[in-house]
Amino acid sequence: MRGAALALLLAAGSVPAAAQVERAPIPLDHLPALAGDYFHLPWPEQNRGFHIYVRLPADYGQHPNGRYPVIYLLDGDSLFPILGASHLFLTYDEGLPEAIVVGIAYGGFDPATNRRGLDFTSPAPGVAAADAGAPAFHAFLKERILPEVERRYRGDPARRILVGQSRAGAFILHSAFADPDLFWGRIASNPSFSGDGQNWFGNPAVATRRDLHLIVTSGSRDRQPYRGDVLRWWESWRDREDRPWTLRFQTIENGTHAANITDAYRLGLLTMFQPERRP
């Protein structure tokens, strides 16, 4: 009887379109450029968690004892499907080594779910303590996300890479200054400074490693004041000799704020992996 009633409602158009079909989740295994794994990682202290998407190297199963660089993508909701697939083409055309690509996703863009504005903002004068969640998120990244990924998959802890753009690009600088040794390489695309921008003109923490990379890119058509802020930052750092990382800054000609993340990703990885690229 209930089935007949539902059929009548559907025929009459009384049931919203979104309710007419219950769609099962589509596994990424059917998208070979993104084939890998997924898990949810709770953050009980914040009453939330993250969706962790993992793109495994195409030859992962062929090398059961092999270890791979691990590339962590902030804003994984949007960057994972773009850069995870892009990495495959970089192995084809640029001779880059395969890597495990990890997208750290919130599960949506609604600010009630997506807390990037909190998680990527650092403490600074004029920034309310309740709005500066970068130290807590960085600790969660270091103490929970990285160990869990490296427990599940054959990642190389010595070759971790962190990628972010816009506010996540500013968080890349937070990480680079707060804990230089944590990541071998970092890529910040169009970092958008906010009230915490002056943090990145001071002195970073001391590093013990001597092989660290920080790549910062800025589109020539990036929004103001972001473009001006990052140019001033580069001018303050370009000649300093106390940098804990090898620093490369690149303007992407005609680049915009968000659409050139693939260019930043490509430039950063080519810089880091130059000595071991296949001919």
Image (cartoon, rainbow, N blue to C red):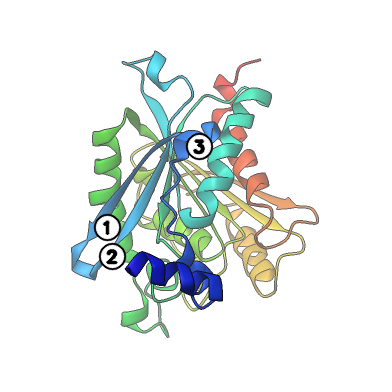
Q: Look at mark 2 in the image and give the residue it sits on.
A: 136
Identify the residue at image location x=47%, y=53%: 76
Residue 68: tell me if it is visible: yes
In depth, the one of 230 and 83 nearer the eye is: 83
Q: Which residue in the structure is indicated by mark 3?
A: 34
Mark 2 vs mark 3, foreground winner is: 3
* Spatial separation of the CA atoms under disc 3 and disc 1: 28 Å
Sequence-first disc among 2 and 3 = 3
Residue sitting nearer the eye, 239 or 56: 56
Q: Position of residue 233 (x, y in %)?
A: 60, 63
Q: CA distance from mark 2 to mark 3?
A: 30 Å
In the rendered view, does 132 fall on the left or right side of 214? left
Label 3 crowd (10 A; few <14 / some 14-19 / many >=20): many
State yes or no: discs 3 and 1 in contact (Cβ < 8 Å): no
Q: Is residue 151 above or below residue 162?
A: above
Q: Nearer the viewer, residue 43 or 219?
A: 43
Say whether marks 1 and 2 touch (CB < 8 Å).
yes
Amino acid type shown at disc 2: Ala
